[in-house]
Amino acid sequence: MKKRIAIFASGSGSNAQKLMEHFKRSADAEIALVLSNNPEAYVLQRADNFEIPSHVFDRHEFYETDQVIDLLKNLDIDFIVLAGFLWLIPQRLISAYAGRIVNIHPAILPKYGGKGMYGDHVHKAVLAAGETEGGITIHYVNEHYDEGEYIYQARYRIDKDDSIEMVKFKGQQLEHQHYPRVVESLMKKIRK
């Protein structure tokens, strides 16, 4: 039986798309559900294109009820992947999926992490600091933003005339290259 992955995303979902493409060909795991806190998120269209069910939830449902956890359990979800999901994961969900929730961050943590550090906010901070390299961090999720145990990091060079768009592009190339591969390697460790 294939292991079942749920993706949480808040926006466009380019990493979610790469995961959907990758696991469409996998014999071991599948993307079984896409969840979002944003009813306008393009990731929902991406899920629809792959015929993957989706669910939109609000703050009340996520933080004050067990509806999301119940949905994950009812659909036999084994693993959760955050792909541009901007809300802090509640303790109940972390407990229900202990050691089975991962996130990708567009910087080499612990630098440029924490509340409000996502997307272009990270890239602007990296450029403003005059860093000569940027990167990505794939990590387990705990009750604090970007503080879970690191699983994988990769770096790219920042040239002195790189724009924010170029830094973002270099980072996304690494994300798209490594995230599906790392998630697949984690799937092999999970017992069904």
Image (cartoon, helix red, strand yellow):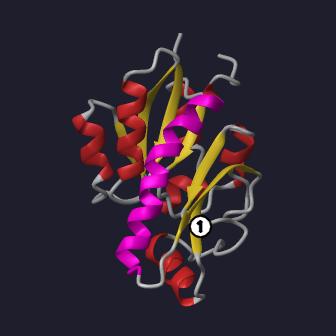
Vertical comparison of 96 with 148: above or below? above
Rendered view: 22 above or below 90: above
x 38%, y 81%: residue: 163
Residue drawn where x is 43% and y is 38% of the image? 19
Q: Can residue 96 be seen from the camera position used here?
A: yes
Which of the 4 image quadrants contains residue 145? bottom right
How many numbered marks are there?
1
Q: Is residue 46 left or right of residue 116?
A: left
Q: Secondary structure at mark 1?
A: loop
User: Neighbour class for label 1 at 10 Å: few (<14), some, many (≥20)?
Assistant: many
Work out whether residue 154 or residue 114 is closer to the camera in this orientation and state it. Answer: 154
Q: Residue at position x 41%, y 84% from top?
A: 161
Report the span colored magenta: 162-186
User: Is 139 within the magenta?
Assistant: no
Residue 89 placement, left or right of 81: right
- Name the kind of residue labelled 1 in the image: Ala
Return the residue at label 1.
107
Residue 125, above or below 145: below
Q: Position of residue 99 (x, y in %)?
A: 74, 39
From the viewer's side, name the closer residue of 26 and 10: 26
42 to the left or right of 72? left
**In terms of depth relative to the viewer, which is nearer, 130 or 30?**
130
Looking at the image, which is closer to me, 149 or 74?
A: 149
- Magenta part, dominant SS: helix
